[in-house]
């Protein structure tokens, strides 16, 4: 049966065609492993794959109207099993999930089991999963989703059909951004800063880019203000973070400042780019960056870009993020 497919997913053309063909021809593999960095559309693809698989429409998949489509949307379709969206992938949770999967009857033609975040699985969980992958329950397809393959046991990987998600091409990003009401300059900045990952772009774009602009203004103020000013600002910032997150551990506070650290790095790199007569990536803030550039030397910028990388590692551990930020800013000045 050949269906028409309507998936609002940009890029990944061959991969999507392949998945759609497997539904049309009813030739599903036992296990797929969707992998690739965050923000590329893996979850969205899983969602549309599941909906299209269970949809009852004879022509359009998914139709979005039939009962299966509606139940799949609510994650309450009987033949659809998911794990790892809100639950930890402990060995116990995996065992329980697989047990349920093996005991349940299929109400339609096929069961689909999806496990998200499979790269966070531990050895015991992996062993439990391996048994199921070796002897999959009847009429069952399993999709494993991972941001990275680094921590996945080879024994698990070798039993999956691997589907790799890669960053979107410039043309696909442009086409996707046509759906949003943005200025050309804003689009350019988003394309430059999201590295072909719509998920990252969406994070930036939330609330008409207001949050992104607010964060950028904050970094500009830190970089252009006096030493006294930024010490005071950082102090206020962390008092507020501590108040809003009572009892947060140091690394948790650090994680809250992580995206600012990424942005700080982008600003430093852009400042260096201006020094080297190269185009900035954060085009929305080109004027501010060019104005600030004369206050920094190439050597200092380069040195601090290296320091940020170290800071990014440290911030994940129990190092005071406030001291880390103060040191970073002091050494840039
Ligand atoms: Zn449908």
Image (cartoon, rainbow, N blue to C red):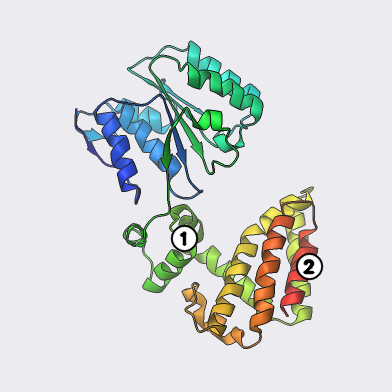
Element assignment for label 2: helix
Q: Name the residue under label 2.
A: 235
Image point (36%, 64%), residue name? 181
| Left or right: 321 in relation to 194 | right
| Left or right: 319 in relation to 52 | right
| Left or right: 68 in relation to 226 | left
Residue 45: % across, % down: 39, 40
Image point (79%, 79%), residue name? 228
Above or below: residue 172 compared with residue 16: below
Label count reads 2
Above or below: residue 49 compared with residue 13: above
Q: Considering the image in quadrants, where does the N terminus appear?
A: top left
Mark 1 Cβ and ligand 1 under 8 Å apart:
no
Q: Residues within 10 Å of mark 1 (few under 14, many from 20)?
A: some
Q: How crowded is mark 2: few (under 14 residues within 10 Å), some or many (20 or more)?
A: some
Image point (77%, 69%), residue name? 326
Residue 270: % across, % down: 55, 76
Element assignment for label 1: loop
Residue 195: give its label. Answer: 1
Above or below: residue 149 compared with residue 39: above
Q: Nearer the viewer, residue 98 or 77?
A: 98
């Amino acid at each position: 049966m050949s269906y028409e497919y309507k998936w609002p997913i940009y890029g990944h053309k061959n991969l999507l065609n392949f998945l759609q063909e497997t539904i049309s021809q009813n030739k599903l593999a036992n296990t797929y492993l969707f992998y690739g960095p965050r923000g590329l559309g893996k979850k969205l693809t899983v969602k549309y794959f599941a909906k299209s698989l269970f949809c009852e429409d004879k022509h359009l998949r998914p139709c979005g109207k039939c009962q299966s489509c509606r139940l799949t949307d609510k994650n309450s379709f009987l033949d659809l099993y998911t794990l790892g969206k809100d639950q930890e992938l402990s060995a116990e949770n995996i065992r329980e999930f697989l047990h349920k999967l093996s005991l349940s009857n299929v109400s339609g033609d096929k069961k689909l089991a999806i496990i998200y975040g499979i790269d966070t699985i531990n050895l015991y969980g992996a062993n439990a999963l391996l048994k199921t992958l070796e002897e999959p329950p009847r009429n069952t397809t399993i999709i494993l989703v991972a941001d990275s393959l680094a921590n996945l046991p080879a024994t698990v990987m070798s039993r999956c059909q691997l589907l790799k998600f890669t960053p979107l091409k410039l043309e696909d990003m442009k086409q996707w951004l046509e759906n949003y009401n943005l200025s050309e300059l804003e689009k350019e900045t988003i394309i430059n800063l999201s590295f072909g990952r719509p998920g990252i772009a969406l994070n930036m774009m939330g609330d008409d880019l207001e949050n992104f602009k607010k964060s950028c203004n904050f970094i500009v103020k830190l970089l252009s203000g006096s030493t006294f000013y930024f010490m005071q600002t950082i102090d206020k910032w962390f008092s507020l973070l501590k108040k809003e997150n009572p009892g947060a551990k140091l690394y948790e506070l650090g994680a809250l400042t992580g995206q600012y650290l990424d942005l700080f790095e982008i600003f430093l790199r852009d400042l260096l780019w201006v020094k080297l007569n190269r185009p900035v990536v954060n085009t929305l803030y080109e004027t501010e960056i060019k104005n600030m550039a004369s206050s920094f030397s190439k050597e200092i910028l380069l040195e601090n870009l290296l320091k940020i990388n170290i800071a990014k590692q440290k911030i994940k551990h129990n190092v005071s993020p406030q001291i880390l930020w103060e040191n970073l800013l002091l050494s840039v000045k």
